Image (tube, rainbow, N blue to C red):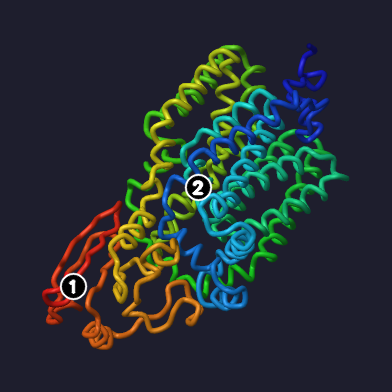
Protein backbone atom coordinates (compact mmCIF):
# COMPACT_ATOMS: atom_id res chain seq x y z
CA UNK A 1 0.00 0.00 0.00
CA UNK A 2 1.46 3.35 -1.00
CA UNK A 3 1.88 6.33 1.26
CA UNK A 4 -1.25 8.46 1.83
CA UNK A 5 0.83 11.49 0.91
CA UNK A 6 1.12 10.33 -2.67
CA UNK A 7 -2.08 8.42 -3.38
CA UNK A 8 -5.53 7.91 -1.86
CA UNK A 9 -5.63 5.06 0.57
CA UNK A 10 -8.79 3.03 0.32
CA UNK A 11 -9.67 1.36 3.62
CA UNK A 12 -12.71 -0.86 3.23
CA UNK A 13 -14.40 1.40 0.73
CA UNK A 14 -13.40 4.86 1.98
CA UNK A 15 -10.61 7.09 0.82
CA UNK A 16 -8.32 8.69 3.36
CA UNK A 17 -5.30 10.92 3.28
CA UNK A 18 -4.42 13.75 0.93
CA UNK A 19 -6.07 12.13 -2.03
CA UNK A 20 -9.36 12.05 -0.13
CA UNK A 21 -9.09 15.75 0.59
CA UNK A 22 -8.57 16.51 -3.07
CA UNK A 23 -11.69 14.49 -3.85
CA UNK A 24 -13.72 16.24 -1.17
CA UNK A 25 -14.10 12.97 0.73
CA UNK A 26 -15.44 11.01 -2.25
CA UNK A 27 -14.58 7.30 -1.83
CA UNK A 28 -11.96 6.22 -4.36
CA UNK A 29 -12.81 2.75 -5.61
CA UNK A 30 -15.59 2.43 -3.06
CA UNK A 31 -16.39 -1.18 -2.12
CA UNK A 32 -19.73 -1.71 -0.38
CA UNK A 33 -18.77 -5.21 0.66
CA UNK A 34 -20.73 -8.43 0.12
CA UNK A 35 -24.46 -8.21 -0.29
CA UNK A 36 -25.16 -10.17 2.87
CA UNK A 37 -23.50 -7.40 4.86
CA UNK A 38 -25.95 -4.92 3.33
CA UNK A 39 -29.01 -7.12 3.85
CA UNK A 40 -28.35 -8.44 7.35
CA UNK A 41 -28.92 -5.30 9.49
CA UNK A 42 -32.39 -4.42 8.11
CA UNK A 43 -33.41 -8.10 8.07
CA UNK A 44 -32.33 -8.65 11.68
CA UNK A 45 -33.98 -5.41 12.75
CA UNK A 46 -37.27 -6.34 11.10
CA UNK A 47 -37.28 -9.80 12.70
CA UNK A 48 -36.63 -8.25 16.12
CA UNK A 49 -39.42 -5.73 15.55
CA UNK A 50 -41.88 -8.53 14.69
CA UNK A 51 -40.91 -10.49 17.80
CA UNK A 52 -43.71 -9.87 20.34
CA UNK A 53 -45.08 -6.90 18.43
CA UNK A 54 -48.62 -7.54 19.76
CA UNK A 55 -47.51 -8.28 23.32
CA UNK A 56 -47.77 -4.79 24.76
CA UNK A 57 -51.12 -3.07 25.12
CA UNK A 58 -51.82 0.14 23.29
CA UNK A 59 -50.87 3.05 25.54
CA UNK A 60 -52.59 6.41 25.81
CA UNK A 61 -50.85 8.01 22.81
CA UNK A 62 -51.57 4.97 20.66
CA UNK A 63 -55.19 5.32 21.78
CA UNK A 64 -55.07 8.82 20.28
CA UNK A 65 -53.82 7.28 17.03
CA UNK A 66 -56.76 4.86 17.09
CA UNK A 67 -59.16 7.73 17.73
CA UNK A 68 -57.83 9.52 14.65
CA UNK A 69 -57.68 6.47 12.40
CA UNK A 70 -61.16 5.09 13.12
CA UNK A 71 -63.23 7.97 11.79
CA UNK A 72 -64.32 9.21 8.36
CA UNK A 73 -61.56 10.86 6.34
CA UNK A 74 -63.36 14.20 6.15
CA UNK A 75 -63.78 14.25 9.91
CA UNK A 76 -60.09 13.39 10.39
CA UNK A 77 -59.06 16.34 8.23
CA UNK A 78 -61.42 18.57 10.21
CA UNK A 79 -59.95 17.24 13.47
CA UNK A 80 -56.41 18.06 12.33
CA UNK A 81 -57.50 21.66 11.98
CA UNK A 82 -58.29 21.61 15.69
CA UNK A 83 -55.58 19.43 17.23
CA UNK A 84 -52.49 17.34 16.49
CA UNK A 85 -51.83 18.70 13.01
CA UNK A 86 -48.16 17.95 13.65
CA UNK A 87 -49.05 14.25 13.49
CA UNK A 88 -51.47 14.66 10.60
CA UNK A 89 -49.35 12.90 7.99
CA UNK A 90 -48.90 9.92 10.28
CA UNK A 91 -52.61 9.77 11.14
CA UNK A 92 -53.46 9.76 7.44
CA UNK A 93 -51.04 6.88 6.89
CA UNK A 94 -52.58 4.84 9.71
CA UNK A 95 -56.07 5.74 8.48
CA UNK A 96 -55.21 3.94 5.24
CA UNK A 97 -53.53 1.05 7.07
CA UNK A 98 -56.57 0.51 9.31
CA UNK A 99 -58.87 0.35 6.31
CA UNK A 100 -56.62 -2.21 4.65
CA UNK A 101 -55.90 -4.45 7.62
CA UNK A 102 -57.96 -3.49 10.67
CA UNK A 103 -57.07 -1.85 13.97
CA UNK A 104 -55.10 -4.68 15.62
CA UNK A 105 -51.67 -4.08 17.08
CA UNK A 106 -49.79 -6.00 14.37
CA UNK A 107 -51.30 -3.98 11.55
CA UNK A 108 -51.04 -0.54 13.12
CA UNK A 109 -47.50 -1.08 14.43
CA UNK A 110 -46.17 -2.63 11.23
CA UNK A 111 -45.29 0.76 9.61
CA UNK A 112 -43.06 1.53 12.60
CA UNK A 113 -41.40 -1.88 12.36
CA UNK A 114 -40.69 -1.33 8.68
CA UNK A 115 -39.39 2.17 9.39
CA UNK A 116 -36.90 0.87 11.95
CA UNK A 117 -35.71 -1.74 9.45
CA UNK A 118 -35.22 1.06 6.94
CA UNK A 119 -33.35 3.08 9.54
CA UNK A 120 -31.02 0.12 10.16
CA UNK A 121 -30.32 -0.07 6.42
CA UNK A 122 -29.46 3.65 6.35
CA UNK A 123 -27.24 3.34 9.43
CA UNK A 124 -25.37 0.42 7.88
CA UNK A 125 -25.00 2.35 4.62
CA UNK A 126 -23.54 5.31 6.52
CA UNK A 127 -21.05 3.05 8.28
CA UNK A 128 -19.97 1.56 4.94
CA UNK A 129 -19.61 4.99 3.34
CA UNK A 130 -17.75 6.63 6.20
CA UNK A 131 -15.60 3.74 7.44
CA UNK A 132 -15.73 0.16 6.12
CA UNK A 133 -18.32 -2.49 5.20
CA UNK A 134 -17.53 -4.24 8.50
CA UNK A 135 -18.22 -1.04 10.44
CA UNK A 136 -21.47 -0.61 8.53
CA UNK A 137 -22.52 -4.15 9.44
CA UNK A 138 -21.64 -3.60 13.10
CA UNK A 139 -23.44 -0.24 13.22
CA UNK A 140 -26.60 -1.67 11.73
CA UNK A 141 -26.60 -4.61 14.15
CA UNK A 142 -26.00 -2.37 17.17
CA UNK A 143 -28.97 -0.30 16.06
CA UNK A 144 -31.08 -3.47 15.75
CA UNK A 145 -30.51 -4.53 19.37
CA UNK A 146 -31.14 -1.16 21.05
CA UNK A 147 -34.21 -1.59 23.33
CA UNK A 148 -35.53 1.88 22.45
CA UNK A 149 -35.54 0.83 18.80
CA UNK A 150 -37.81 -2.07 19.74
CA UNK A 151 -40.04 0.08 21.93
CA UNK A 152 -40.74 2.62 19.21
CA UNK A 153 -40.55 0.11 16.38
CA UNK A 154 -43.55 -1.53 18.03
CA UNK A 155 -45.47 1.68 18.61
CA UNK A 156 -48.35 3.09 16.57
CA UNK A 157 -46.84 6.56 16.70
CA UNK A 158 -44.60 8.44 14.20
CA UNK A 159 -41.28 8.28 16.06
CA UNK A 160 -39.84 5.28 14.18
CA UNK A 161 -40.52 7.05 10.90
CA UNK A 162 -38.72 10.12 12.26
CA UNK A 163 -35.67 7.98 13.12
CA UNK A 164 -35.68 6.44 9.64
CA UNK A 165 -35.97 9.80 7.89
CA UNK A 166 -33.19 11.27 10.05
CA UNK A 167 -30.89 8.38 9.13
CA UNK A 168 -31.81 8.67 5.46
CA UNK A 169 -31.30 12.44 5.44
CA UNK A 170 -27.87 11.97 6.99
CA UNK A 171 -26.98 9.38 4.36
CA UNK A 172 -28.07 11.71 1.56
CA UNK A 173 -25.99 14.51 3.08
CA UNK A 174 -22.92 12.26 3.19
CA UNK A 175 -23.45 11.26 -0.43
CA UNK A 176 -23.77 14.95 -1.37
CA UNK A 177 -20.51 15.73 0.43
CA UNK A 178 -18.74 12.85 -1.31
CA UNK A 179 -20.19 13.45 -4.79
CA UNK A 180 -18.54 15.25 -7.66
CA UNK A 181 -19.83 18.84 -7.95
CA UNK A 182 -21.79 17.99 -11.09
CA UNK A 183 -23.70 15.18 -9.39
CA UNK A 184 -24.15 16.85 -5.99
CA UNK A 185 -27.45 18.56 -6.82
CA UNK A 186 -29.22 15.21 -7.17
CA UNK A 187 -28.27 14.16 -3.67
CA UNK A 188 -29.14 17.58 -2.24
CA UNK A 189 -32.54 17.48 -3.95
CA UNK A 190 -33.26 14.16 -2.29
CA UNK A 191 -31.94 15.59 0.96
CA UNK A 192 -34.32 18.56 0.77
CA UNK A 193 -37.27 16.24 0.11
CA UNK A 194 -36.24 14.08 3.07
CA UNK A 195 -36.03 17.10 5.38
CA UNK A 196 -39.48 18.19 4.23
CA UNK A 197 -40.88 14.74 5.02
CA UNK A 198 -39.12 14.83 8.38
CA UNK A 199 -40.73 18.15 9.31
CA UNK A 200 -44.15 17.05 8.07
CA UNK A 201 -44.11 13.82 10.06
CA UNK A 202 -42.83 15.50 13.24
CA UNK A 203 -41.64 19.08 13.50
CA UNK A 204 -39.06 18.15 16.13
CA UNK A 205 -37.36 16.08 13.46
CA UNK A 206 -36.06 19.35 12.02
CA UNK A 207 -33.70 19.53 15.00
CA UNK A 208 -31.45 17.55 12.69
CA UNK A 209 -30.83 20.68 10.60
CA UNK A 210 -28.65 22.52 13.18
CA UNK A 211 -26.63 19.32 13.65
CA UNK A 212 -26.10 19.03 9.90
CA UNK A 213 -25.18 22.71 9.75
CA UNK A 214 -22.23 21.96 12.04
CA UNK A 215 -21.31 18.94 9.92
CA UNK A 216 -21.26 21.03 6.74
CA UNK A 217 -19.39 23.85 8.47
CA UNK A 218 -16.69 21.45 9.61
CA UNK A 219 -16.40 20.12 6.07
CA UNK A 220 -16.05 23.66 4.75
CA UNK A 221 -13.30 24.41 7.28
CA UNK A 222 -11.42 21.25 6.31
CA UNK A 223 -11.61 22.31 2.66
CA UNK A 224 -10.38 25.81 3.55
CA UNK A 225 -7.51 24.38 5.63
CA UNK A 226 -6.32 22.45 2.60
CA UNK A 227 -5.03 25.76 1.31
CA UNK A 228 -6.13 25.15 -2.26
CA UNK A 229 -8.37 27.62 -4.07
CA UNK A 230 -10.27 24.75 -5.69
CA UNK A 231 -10.89 23.19 -2.28
CA UNK A 232 -12.24 26.44 -0.87
CA UNK A 233 -14.54 26.94 -3.85
CA UNK A 234 -15.81 23.36 -3.56
CA UNK A 235 -16.41 23.80 0.16
CA UNK A 236 -18.27 27.06 -0.40
CA UNK A 237 -20.40 25.48 -3.14
CA UNK A 238 -21.26 22.57 -0.84
CA UNK A 239 -22.20 24.91 2.00
CA UNK A 240 -24.41 27.06 -0.23
CA UNK A 241 -26.03 24.00 -1.79
CA UNK A 242 -26.75 22.52 1.63
CA UNK A 243 -28.21 25.81 2.84
CA UNK A 244 -30.53 26.00 -0.17
CA UNK A 245 -31.66 22.40 0.42
CA UNK A 246 -32.26 23.01 4.13
CA UNK A 247 -34.28 26.16 3.41
CA UNK A 248 -36.30 24.38 0.73
CA UNK A 249 -37.05 21.43 3.01
CA UNK A 250 -38.10 23.71 5.85
CA UNK A 251 -40.26 25.77 3.50
CA UNK A 252 -42.09 22.66 2.29
CA UNK A 253 -42.77 21.69 5.91
CA UNK A 254 -43.73 25.24 6.94
CA UNK A 255 -47.54 24.73 6.83
CA UNK A 256 -47.20 22.01 9.46
CA UNK A 257 -44.81 24.22 11.44
CA UNK A 258 -47.37 27.02 11.39
CA UNK A 259 -50.20 24.74 12.51
CA UNK A 260 -47.95 23.31 15.19
CA UNK A 261 -47.32 26.79 16.55
CA UNK A 262 -51.05 27.59 16.59
CA UNK A 263 -51.76 24.29 18.36
CA UNK A 264 -48.77 24.52 20.74
CA UNK A 265 -51.11 24.07 23.68
CA UNK A 266 -50.91 20.32 23.00
CA UNK A 267 -47.46 20.44 24.66
CA UNK A 268 -48.95 21.67 27.93
CA UNK A 269 -48.47 18.22 29.47
CA UNK A 270 -44.69 18.69 29.41
CA UNK A 271 -42.96 19.85 32.58
CA UNK A 272 -39.61 21.63 32.91
CA UNK A 273 -36.85 18.99 32.63
CA UNK A 274 -34.73 18.19 35.64
CA UNK A 275 -31.01 17.50 35.67
CA UNK A 276 -31.90 13.81 35.41
CA UNK A 277 -33.07 14.49 31.84
CA UNK A 278 -29.43 15.03 30.80
CA UNK A 279 -28.19 11.88 32.48
CA UNK A 280 -31.28 10.04 31.22
CA UNK A 281 -30.05 10.40 27.64
CA UNK A 282 -28.11 7.18 28.21
CA UNK A 283 -31.45 5.40 27.72
CA UNK A 284 -30.99 5.87 23.98
CA UNK A 285 -28.16 3.33 24.23
CA UNK A 286 -30.10 0.99 26.51
CA UNK A 287 -30.20 0.16 30.24
CA UNK A 288 -27.32 1.34 32.40
CA UNK A 289 -24.99 -1.66 31.95
CA UNK A 290 -25.69 -1.87 28.24
CA UNK A 291 -25.10 1.86 27.77
CA UNK A 292 -21.87 1.65 29.80
CA UNK A 293 -20.62 -1.16 27.58
CA UNK A 294 -21.46 0.82 24.43
CA UNK A 295 -19.36 3.71 25.75
CA UNK A 296 -16.58 1.29 26.71
CA UNK A 297 -16.58 -0.25 23.23
CA UNK A 298 -16.25 3.19 21.64
CA UNK A 299 -13.40 4.12 23.99
CA UNK A 300 -11.65 0.78 23.47
CA UNK A 301 -11.96 1.11 19.70
CA UNK A 302 -10.29 4.52 19.82
CA UNK A 303 -7.47 3.24 22.04
CA UNK A 304 -6.83 0.15 19.89
CA UNK A 305 -6.78 2.29 16.76
CA UNK A 306 -4.42 4.82 18.32
CA UNK A 307 -2.01 2.10 19.41
CA UNK A 308 -1.94 0.78 15.84
CA UNK A 309 -0.74 4.15 14.59
CA UNK A 310 -1.98 7.44 13.22
CA UNK A 311 -3.05 6.05 9.84
CA UNK A 312 -5.14 3.34 11.52
CA UNK A 313 -6.70 5.91 13.85
CA UNK A 314 -7.65 8.14 10.94
CA UNK A 315 -8.98 5.20 8.96
CA UNK A 316 -11.10 3.81 11.82
CA UNK A 317 -12.26 7.19 13.15
CA UNK A 318 -12.34 9.59 10.18
CA UNK A 319 -13.21 13.21 10.74
CA UNK A 320 -16.27 12.80 8.54
CA UNK A 321 -17.69 10.23 11.00
CA UNK A 322 -17.13 12.36 14.06
CA UNK A 323 -18.22 15.51 12.23
CA UNK A 324 -21.55 13.83 11.45
CA UNK A 325 -22.23 11.88 14.63
CA UNK A 326 -21.19 14.23 17.43
CA UNK A 327 -23.39 17.19 16.39
CA UNK A 328 -26.21 14.73 15.63
CA UNK A 329 -25.93 13.25 19.10
CA UNK A 330 -25.42 16.47 21.05
CA UNK A 331 -27.33 19.33 19.44
CA UNK A 332 -30.98 18.11 19.27
CA UNK A 333 -31.24 17.35 23.02
CA UNK A 334 -29.20 20.44 23.88
CA UNK A 335 -31.54 22.69 21.88
CA UNK A 336 -34.63 21.22 23.53
CA UNK A 337 -33.14 21.39 27.01
CA UNK A 338 -32.07 25.01 26.54
CA UNK A 339 -35.42 25.90 25.00
CA UNK A 340 -37.12 24.32 28.01
CA UNK A 341 -35.67 27.12 30.15
CA UNK A 342 -38.31 29.29 28.42
CA UNK A 343 -41.12 26.77 27.95
CA UNK A 344 -41.08 22.99 28.47
CA UNK A 345 -40.13 21.24 25.22
CA UNK A 346 -38.06 18.22 26.19
CA UNK A 347 -39.01 14.58 26.42
CA UNK A 348 -36.85 11.62 25.46
CA UNK A 349 -38.95 10.53 22.50
CA UNK A 350 -38.37 13.90 20.82
CA UNK A 351 -34.65 13.07 20.53
CA UNK A 352 -34.94 9.47 19.37
CA UNK A 353 -33.58 10.68 16.03
CA UNK A 354 -30.14 10.67 17.73
CA UNK A 355 -30.05 6.85 18.06
CA UNK A 356 -28.42 6.24 14.66
CA UNK A 357 -25.46 8.38 15.74
CA UNK A 358 -24.94 6.16 18.80
CA UNK A 359 -25.11 3.04 16.63
CA UNK A 360 -22.57 4.47 14.17
CA UNK A 361 -20.05 5.31 16.89
CA UNK A 362 -20.55 1.92 18.55
CA UNK A 363 -20.20 0.19 15.18
CA UNK A 364 -16.93 2.01 14.54
CA UNK A 365 -15.69 0.82 17.93
CA UNK A 366 -16.68 -2.79 17.25
CA UNK A 367 -15.01 -2.75 13.83
CA UNK A 368 -11.82 -1.30 15.31
CA UNK A 369 -11.65 -4.18 17.81
CA UNK A 370 -11.48 -6.75 14.99
CA UNK A 371 -13.78 -9.59 14.00
CA UNK A 372 -13.36 -11.79 17.08
CA UNK A 373 -13.35 -9.16 19.84
CA UNK A 374 -15.91 -7.05 18.02
CA UNK A 375 -18.32 -9.94 17.56
CA UNK A 376 -17.93 -10.95 21.20
CA UNK A 377 -18.60 -7.39 22.35
CA UNK A 378 -21.68 -7.14 20.12
CA UNK A 379 -23.06 -10.36 21.59
CA UNK A 380 -22.55 -9.06 25.14
CA UNK A 381 -24.23 -5.75 24.24
CA UNK A 382 -27.21 -7.65 22.84
CA UNK A 383 -27.42 -9.96 25.89
CA UNK A 384 -27.35 -7.02 28.31
CA UNK A 385 -30.34 -5.59 26.47
CA UNK A 386 -32.44 -8.77 26.62
CA UNK A 387 -34.25 -7.97 29.92
CA UNK A 388 -35.31 -4.58 28.54
CA UNK A 389 -36.30 -6.19 25.23
CA UNK A 390 -38.51 -8.67 27.07
CA UNK A 391 -40.00 -5.94 29.25
CA UNK A 392 -41.12 -3.73 26.36
CA UNK A 393 -42.94 -6.73 24.88
CA UNK A 394 -44.88 -7.48 28.07
CA UNK A 395 -48.51 -6.40 28.54
CA UNK A 396 -47.32 -3.28 30.41
CA UNK A 397 -44.41 -2.72 28.02
CA UNK A 398 -45.57 0.71 26.87
CA UNK A 399 -46.55 1.84 30.36
CA UNK A 400 -50.35 1.89 30.09
CA UNK A 401 -52.11 -1.48 29.97
CA UNK A 402 -55.30 -0.17 28.40
CA UNK A 403 -56.11 -3.60 26.99
CA UNK A 404 -56.30 -5.26 30.41
CA UNK A 405 -58.36 -2.40 31.83
CA UNK A 406 -60.76 -2.67 28.92
CA UNK A 407 -61.13 -6.42 29.42
CA UNK A 408 -61.77 -5.98 33.14
CA UNK A 409 -64.64 -3.66 32.27
CA UNK A 410 -65.91 -6.10 29.63
CA UNK A 411 -66.02 -8.96 32.16
CA UNK A 412 -67.81 -6.99 34.85
CA UNK A 413 -70.06 -4.48 33.08
CA UNK A 414 -73.84 -4.61 32.87
CA UNK A 415 -76.29 -3.01 30.45
CA UNK A 416 -76.82 0.64 31.34
CA UNK A 417 -73.46 1.11 33.10
CA UNK A 418 -71.99 4.59 32.76
CA UNK A 419 -68.39 5.78 32.80
CA UNK A 420 -66.47 8.79 34.10
CA UNK A 421 -62.93 9.22 32.79
CA UNK A 422 -60.16 11.29 34.32
CA UNK A 423 -57.02 11.80 32.20
CA UNK A 424 -58.16 8.68 30.34
CA UNK A 425 -60.68 10.16 27.93
CA UNK A 426 -59.24 8.49 24.81
CA UNK A 427 -58.86 5.00 26.29
CA UNK A 428 -62.25 4.01 24.88
CA UNK A 429 -60.85 4.43 21.36
CA UNK A 430 -58.09 1.84 21.85
CA UNK A 431 -60.14 -1.34 22.20
CA UNK A 432 -63.79 -2.26 21.62
CA UNK A 433 -64.27 -4.72 24.47
CA UNK A 434 -65.56 -2.71 27.41
CA UNK A 435 -65.02 1.00 28.00
CA UNK A 436 -66.38 1.90 24.57
CA UNK A 437 -69.63 0.07 25.43
CA UNK A 438 -70.30 2.16 28.54
CA UNK A 439 -72.45 5.32 28.56
CA UNK A 440 -70.12 8.37 28.61
CA UNK A 441 -72.21 10.29 31.10
CA UNK A 442 -69.94 13.35 31.13
CA UNK A 443 -69.62 13.68 27.36
CA UNK A 444 -71.32 16.53 25.53
CA UNK A 445 -70.11 15.56 22.04
CA UNK A 446 -68.29 12.47 20.84
CA UNK A 447 -64.83 12.77 19.26
CA UNK A 448 -66.37 12.60 15.79
CA UNK A 449 -69.14 15.09 16.57
CA UNK A 450 -66.67 17.60 18.01
CA UNK A 451 -63.85 16.87 15.52
CA UNK A 452 -61.45 16.28 18.41
CA UNK A 453 -59.58 13.24 19.69
CA UNK A 454 -61.47 12.88 22.99
CA UNK A 455 -64.76 14.76 22.55
CA UNK A 456 -66.14 17.62 24.64
CA UNK A 457 -67.52 17.47 28.15
CA UNK A 458 -70.42 18.81 30.17
CA UNK A 459 -70.15 21.03 33.25
CA UNK A 460 -70.20 19.22 36.60
CA UNK A 461 -73.77 20.22 37.61
CA UNK A 462 -75.13 18.67 34.40
CA UNK A 463 -73.05 15.54 34.94
CA UNK A 464 -74.35 15.19 38.49
CA UNK A 465 -77.92 15.49 37.22
CA UNK A 466 -77.24 12.72 34.70
CA UNK A 467 -75.73 10.53 37.40
CA UNK A 468 -78.98 10.59 39.35
CA UNK A 469 -80.44 8.43 36.56
CA UNK A 470 -77.56 5.94 36.57
CA UNK A 471 -77.51 2.77 38.67
CA UNK A 472 -73.82 1.87 38.24
CA UNK A 473 -70.89 4.01 37.16
CA UNK A 474 -67.33 3.09 36.29
CA UNK A 475 -64.55 5.57 37.08
CA UNK A 476 -61.43 5.23 34.92
CA UNK A 477 -58.42 7.20 36.16
CA UNK A 478 -54.93 7.47 34.75
CA UNK A 479 -52.11 8.06 37.22
CA UNK A 480 -52.79 8.72 40.88
CA UNK A 481 -56.46 8.49 41.90
CA UNK A 482 -58.05 11.67 43.24
CA UNK A 483 -61.09 12.23 45.49
CA UNK A 484 -64.30 11.93 43.46
CA UNK A 485 -66.03 15.09 44.56
CA UNK A 486 -68.51 14.81 41.72
CA UNK A 487 -70.10 11.75 43.37
CA UNK A 488 -70.56 13.38 46.79
CA UNK A 489 -74.14 13.30 47.98
CA UNK A 490 -75.36 11.04 45.17
CA UNK A 491 -75.47 7.90 47.36
CA UNK A 492 -73.00 5.85 45.36
CA UNK A 493 -70.93 3.25 47.17
CA UNK A 494 -67.71 1.63 46.00
CA UNK A 495 -68.31 -1.95 44.88
CA UNK A 496 -64.82 -2.88 43.72
CA UNK A 497 -61.53 -1.39 42.60
CA UNK A 498 -58.88 -2.66 40.17
CA UNK A 499 -55.45 -1.43 39.19
CA UNK A 500 -53.58 -2.35 36.02
CA UNK A 501 -50.26 -0.64 35.29
CA UNK A 502 -50.98 3.05 35.95
CA UNK A 503 -54.72 2.79 35.34
CA UNK A 504 -57.29 2.64 38.14
CA UNK A 505 -60.81 1.29 37.75
CA UNK A 506 -63.51 1.94 40.34
CA UNK A 507 -66.99 0.50 40.11
CA UNK A 508 -69.69 2.36 42.03
CA UNK A 509 -73.29 1.34 42.51
CA UNK A 510 -76.22 3.45 43.64
CA UNK A 511 -77.77 2.74 47.05
CA UNK A 512 -77.75 -0.91 48.07
CA UNK A 513 -77.29 -2.27 44.53
CA UNK A 514 -74.22 -4.30 43.49
Count the marks: 2
Nearer-the-camera pick, 377 or 112:
112
In this image, 337 relative to 498: left or right? right
Nearer-the-camera pick, 185 or 433:
433
Disc 2 and disc 1 in contact, CB within 8 angstroms: no
Q: Above or below — where is 189 with respect to 294?
A: below
- Residue name at image x 46 percent, y 22 percent: 380
Asked whether residue 394 is in view, the answer is yes
Classify mark 1: helix, strand or loop.
Answer: strand
- Residue name at image x 80 percent, y 22 percent: 8
Percent x, y of residue 331: 52, 48
- Residue name at image x 40 percent, y 69 percent: 436
Compute the Cα span from label 2 to label 1: 40 Å
Classify mark 2: helix, strand or loop.
Answer: helix
In this image, 446 relative to 323: left or right? left
Q: Which mark is residue 152?
A: 2
The image quadrant of residue 1 is top right
* Foreground tag (2 vs 1): 1
Amino acid sequence: MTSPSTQPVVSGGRATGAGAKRGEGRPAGFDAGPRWMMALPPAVTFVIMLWGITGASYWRDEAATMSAAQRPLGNLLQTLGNIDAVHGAYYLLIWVVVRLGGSGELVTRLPSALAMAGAAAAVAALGRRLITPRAGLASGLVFAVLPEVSLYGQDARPYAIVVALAALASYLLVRAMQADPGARHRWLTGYAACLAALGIVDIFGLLLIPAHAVTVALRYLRAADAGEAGGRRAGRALALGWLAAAVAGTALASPVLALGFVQRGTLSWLSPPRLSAVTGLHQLAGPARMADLVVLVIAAGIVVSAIAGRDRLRASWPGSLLGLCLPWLILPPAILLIGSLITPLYTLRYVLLCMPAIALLAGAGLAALGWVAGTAALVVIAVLGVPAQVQVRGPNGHGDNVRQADRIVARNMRPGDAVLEFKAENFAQAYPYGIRQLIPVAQAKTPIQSATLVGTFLPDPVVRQRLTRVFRVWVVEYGHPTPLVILNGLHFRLVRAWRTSDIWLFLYAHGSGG
